[in-house]
Image (tube, rainbow, N blue to C red):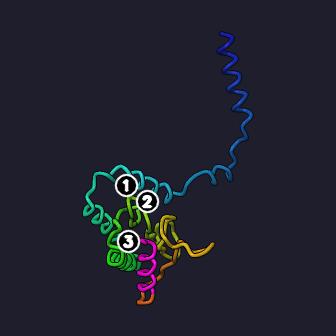
Amino acid sequence: MAKTETKTQAKKTAAAAKPAKTAKTAKTETFSAEERAAMKERSKEARNRGKQTPEEAEAEVLAKIAEFDEDDRKVAEKVHAIVRKNAPGLTPRLYYGMPAYAKDGKVLCFFQQSGKFKARYSTLGFQDNAALDDGAFWPTSFAVTKMTAAVEKQIAALVKQAAG
């Protein structure tokens, strides 16, 4: 009985020694609703990964794009077309609920619509496996507010370079 009491007392002492969480501390340790939703989407995507054909994965990406608001949808559809044309070896798939394109099973680039995390603009992002290296400093994410011929050309060049 004495050993049980000692263990219990030790646990109470350890618990009392921990600093109490303040409202500020608790807030910084939690994720936003958008971040939690993205993590749930990622978990679902991981479970489905091996079960989908490439055609089903692309259909899922296109269905996700169709859910975007009009401005983001137009840009995302163009990005999708540019990637498919200029890097046909990349495989479309969802990544944290965002349209993404993978090379050898690893996401290479992705499109994040502005509404995803309440941002003021959409972004085209590249992962570290993208061949965009340029010295000791280079961008890996690009803001996209509207699609123009010049922007299309820049995205095509970036995607070609990233895919190697």
**Which residue reaches farthest bottom?**
149
Q: Is residue 14 left or right of residue 103?
A: right
User: Residue 56: where, in percent of width, then height?
Assistant: 26, 61
Spatial CA span between label 2 and label 1: 8 Å
**Quarter the N terminus occupies:** top right
Which mark, residue 68?
3
User: Residue 25: where, in percent of width, then height?
Assistant: 67, 50
Q: Residue at x 42, y 76 (%)?
A: 159
The reply to whether callout 3 and callout 1 are in contact (CB within 8 Å) is no
Looking at the rendered image, the disc whose residue lies closer to the viewer, 3 or 1, is 1
User: Badge 2, how many Cα within 10 Å: few under 14, some, many 20+?
Assistant: many
Which mark, residue 45?
1
The reply to whether callout 2 and callout 1 are in contact (CB within 8 Å) is yes
Give the residue type that dot 1 points to. Glu
Q: Is residue 134 above or below residue 34?
A: below
Q: Nearer the viewer, residue 124 or 113?
A: 124
Q: Residue at x 74, y 34 (%)?
A: 17
Q: Is residue 58 left or right of residue 6?
A: left
Numbered disc total: 3
User: Residue 153: where, in percent of width, then height?
Assistant: 42, 86
The residue that label 2 is drawn on is 96
The reply to whether callout 2 and callout 3 are in contact (CB within 8 Å) is no
